[in-house]
Image (spheres, rainbow, N blue to C red):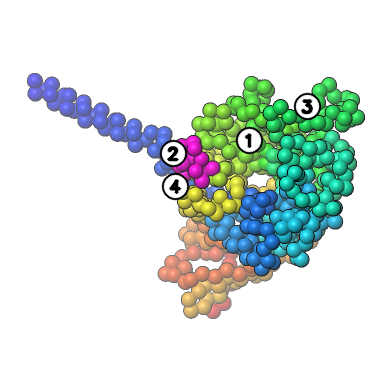
Amino acid sequence: MLKTILYFLCLNVCLNFLLNSCVQNSPASVSKKKLYNLTPPKYECRAVWVVTLNNKDFPSKKGLSIAQQKKEWQDLLDYHQKKGINTIIFQVRSAGDAVYPSPHEPWSEWITGIQGKSPEYDLLEYVVAETHRRNMEFHAWFNPYRAIAKFKKTKIAPNHITKLHPEWCIPYHENMHLNPALPEVRDYLTKVILDVVKKYDIDGVHFDDYFYPYKVEKKEFDDNASFILYGGNFKNKADWRRNNVDIFIKNLRDSLDIVKPYIKFGISPIGVWRNKKDDKRGSDSDISQPCYDILYADVRKWLEKGWIDYVAPQLYWHNGHPKGDFQKLLNWWADNSFGKHLYIGHATYKLRGEDNEKWKNVEEINQQLYAVRQNKNVKGSVFFCAKSFMANYMQTTDSLHRFFYKKPAIIPPMSWKDDTPPSPPKNIRYQFTPNHIHISWEKPFSEQPTDEAKYYAVYKVPSYTLDNLTDVKYLVKLQKQNFYFEKITEETKNYRYIVTAFDRLHNESQAIEAKNFVN
């Protein structure tokens, strides 16, 4: 009997040990452990959308003074930079208007309160310069086809496109849209965008998901007359509409390559291209308005053809969503990015208090960022929008900064645009002061503007290791200045300082170690 009792006691102990081991090493707990011990990548795009429409993000309201607008922009940039963001996607044209002095379109009402009224300074020039001063990229975000948002409530300036060319416009539901079928519209939109590209030192041109309008039940987009005029070679209107958008995207790509080849061109579609039930190439999803079928935007084709440089699908569904599972969609886009950059769009705004329990947990966004990091074809993230990111719902932004963005990241280079690195920094020197070590260098010479050194990386490498600049833990600072200093500690003598230069497309130069001590 005693042997039997001892046998069952030992068996119980073993079973409990195995059970506890399983619990400790369950997928959820293991992933959580990994989640908070991730090594940040050296290269990663960390972007945020900044909305001007309806004063959603910036400026906070109409009619602020120049000083107030500038202060708000500085505060917005400082906050995002502190939290690890390295790219700003700023809405410069929300609905046939402009946040800059345009020869083609009126000033946005969201700036001064009256469409067509100037704020008496070049707002776009200022926001681009301030963004670059913080060593962040600036992408100009255009809504090409939306001419008026809620046209029955909007007071339109005399030089608005809907008044100059009403024949180019089609009303649909609450909005007025430019007709994508018209060659005149495509030429006009290209002219508007190139005006910004030529005049401002932007890094990218960005479109969101609005091409043909989202479908409203029992309402049709009335482009029958245009189909009769231009659709002769097409058997159905859907293919014709997609071709209209294709022509615009391809022509704009060609124009950008002529004017400024280094400009990036990116699209942020709704997160489903096509459902698998409609196309075997599509994703395992069941979304009612995919971009291919309803918005007539064949983003997958644009990636395959190389017409765009990056895609930022709006994956605004949670993990486990029955119709649009985040992980499944992320994997689909990763498998269909055709070597171009993929940045995942995250819905931080949903953390403010959505009904779904998934969005009441900070772990949802953390798990999404973890999934992004695990897929080698995903190059970063974009957050919608600046206001929700700064609101820090459930301390999500703090969590992102603490666990995911605790080290600076370099924006991934695009080798198909440029893969030539700049020359390395020159004459790197140490200088000791009573409390600090001061490192300085000279900007390298460049024969081509595209190879000019735009910023620098400072690495701090232990003396006993080989140069391993791929490990982000040695990256101390990314900066535009040609000097760096830090407090002297007991361990300072055990480190070597190395500096590299980067061009505007983030190609890195040869590494140069600071060896010239000046006492």
Q: Which residue is mark 4?
A: 37
Which is closer to the viewer, label 2 or label 3?
Answer: 3
Give the mark nearest the N terminus, 2 or 3: 2
Q: Which mark is residue 271?
A: 1
Q: If you read the primary sequence from the N terminus, does the residue marked by circle 1 or circle 3 appear first?
A: 3
Query: Mark 3: which secondary structure?
Result: helix
Give the CA distance from mark 2 to mark 1.
25 Å
Task: Tell me the distance, in whole angstroms, between the alpha carbons under discs 1 and 3.
Answer: 20 Å
Q: Are marks 2 and 1 in contact (CB under 8 Å)?
A: no
| Furthest-front residue in this view | 152
Instruction: Find residue 19 and name its label.
Output: none
Q: Which residue is mark 3?
A: 238
- Name the residue rendered at 85%, 53% in the picture: 159
Q: Is residue 326 above or below residue 470?
A: above
Question: Residue 147 vs residue 86: left or right?
Answer: right
Amino acid type indicated by mark 4: Asn
- Whichever of labels 3 and 4 marks the residue nearer the N terminus, that label is 4
- Tell me the residue at 64%/21% (across/down): 277
How would you rate the neighbour count of disc 1 (Cα within 10 Å): few for under 14, some for 14-19, many for 20 or more?
many
Image-quadrant location for residue 500: bottom right
Inter-mark Cα distance, 4 to 2: 10 Å
First-in-chain label (4 vs 2) = 2
Q: Which residues are magenta?
A: 350-365
